[in-house]
Image (cartoon, helix red, strand yellow):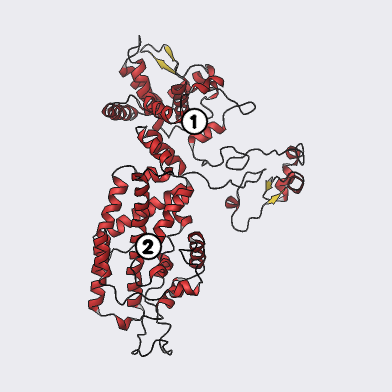
Amino acid sequence: MASATKDHATVEKPGGFPSLLSKKFNITDIKQDVLKWDKEWEVAIASSTAADVLKEMSRLLDDSLFTPSDMELLHKGLRNFQNPIADVMRKLLHNGHFDTVWLLLDSAEQKRHVLEGLKGASEAATIWGQDCRALCPEVTVPNLLSQGGKGFIDFLTRVSEAFGSSIEPGFLPNSWWEQASNLPNPWWGQASDVSPRKQISQSTKLVFEVATINRNKFIGHFALSSTMSIVHDITNRSEGMKEILHIMENTQGHVARSLAQVKTTFREKPLIRCENCTKTPEDIGQGARFMVCSVCKTKLKFEVHYCSQSCQKENWSVHKKACGKKKVTKGLSGTKGDSLWAFSDSDPVANLMRNLPNKDGRFTLRDIGVNPCKGKRSPAAERQAEMLEADKDADYFLFTASGKPVRFVIDDLGAKLIFRTNRGVVMTQPTDTTGVNALGEYMLKLMSNYPGLSRDIILKQLCAEFGEDIAEKIVQLERVSQKLGTGTFIETWLKDWSKIFGSFSWLKLL
């Protein structure tokens, strides 16, 4: 990395310029307060157009200063700089669990690493120094920490693809910045504040190209600095990394990857829904203005939302019982009243938990049934669902060749919870058959030698219930489990989860 940076620095022309943009926007010195520095840059970027930025950069530079030879050297220097960075990004993203570790970090740790990346990029050798940040509107903390940090992984993936591309120049595209391409020079014909200087060019085409090269240098330095900050913490087992490394080192990866994936779907704040029609402002469209119950807000400091007066009137017969007396809502999905508001409405496990019957916030494993189907089950799956609803103590029903039902009951409470959760998802959403593989693998191991049953009989039943391709998918999962030597998917998940969160003995209390 150091050699690539050094090679590129030798072709910069001319030497570094004073920070015009940071002076214009009165940006705080990064060494004094990095958080304030970052926030001020974000405000400056949001309030500027690409043309505004290029105008400031054209103040001391114009196309007449660059020869074809200069441009060739700058392009070559950028490519020499990009190649090793692309290699590092590929290795991090495709070899190992860098993305999982990053996604499992809490937001404060993620922000710290992003700021380290921005600091490193701002102090790196580019023509405009920290002003290059104004060329990179996508490199902001909110963007990179979106979706639980998935924004950062997506950004690194784009950098890896652009920098490793065989197409030259390997520029990371950005429609906002590209609006400034080939604009007329705003300073042409005006008196120069740099004297003496030859007649300036009317064009900014080359200045834009030089700025784009430095934009990509800034992006490369940011990608390298931020990822090396993360790698440093992993290597040195920093305080903020210890818990994540514990999860990674004490599991086969199922729990860690699943937790990381779920985290990317989390909402950052609860939704606002109309208590009557359940619509959100986004559902209604531009100009939507929601009302709140004034009595609840005044007396209880509690908000019950309505999209219109008509919806408030329609819901009055329900709401009046608690109005101004108790903090009560319908607990609509994704709102503050939903204890699982952070989970997406499309999360099958969260929806399963939302639909569980409970009293005083309690439920039992027997309550994890099959729930109403969102779609159409096969006749065989429909029969299974009806039998499970009729016998809530059974975890599944298998059938002998003659059609005699065999109750499958799991004694291990942890395995029962995992099995029933997967069962609830596949029974509720027939098109989501991922969990069937885990159920089938587990039942094949435990029930293939049961009197009247066999491996072929069980697979044939599951194909009738969930589709002909299920048998092949279950066999593929078995091969993976055998290769790992850790037992079935459910057994491995149970072991991993127990290592991290302890035993499932607490389920006896439900």
Q: Quadrant of the N terminus?
A: bottom left
The structure residue drawn at horizontal position 45% and vertical position 53%, both measured from the top left corner, is 112
Q: Quadrant of the C terminus?
A: top right
- Which residue bears the numbered disc 2? 121
- Which residue bears the numbered disc 1? 428
Picture coordinates of residue 287, whole percent (x, y): 62, 58
Instruction: Identify whether 478 is placed above or below 221.
Output: above
Instruction: Identify whether 23 is placed above or below 348.
Output: below
Residue type marked 2: Ala
Instruction: Give residue 202's quadrant in the image.
Output: bottom left
Q: In terms of secondary structure, where does tag 2 sit?
A: helix
Frontmost residue, 101 versus 305: 101
Instruction: Give residue 449's quadrant in the image.
Output: top left
Q: Nearer the viewer, mark 1 or mark 2?
A: 2
Q: In terms of secondary structure, where does tag 1 sit?
A: helix
Frontmost residue, 272 versus 144: 144
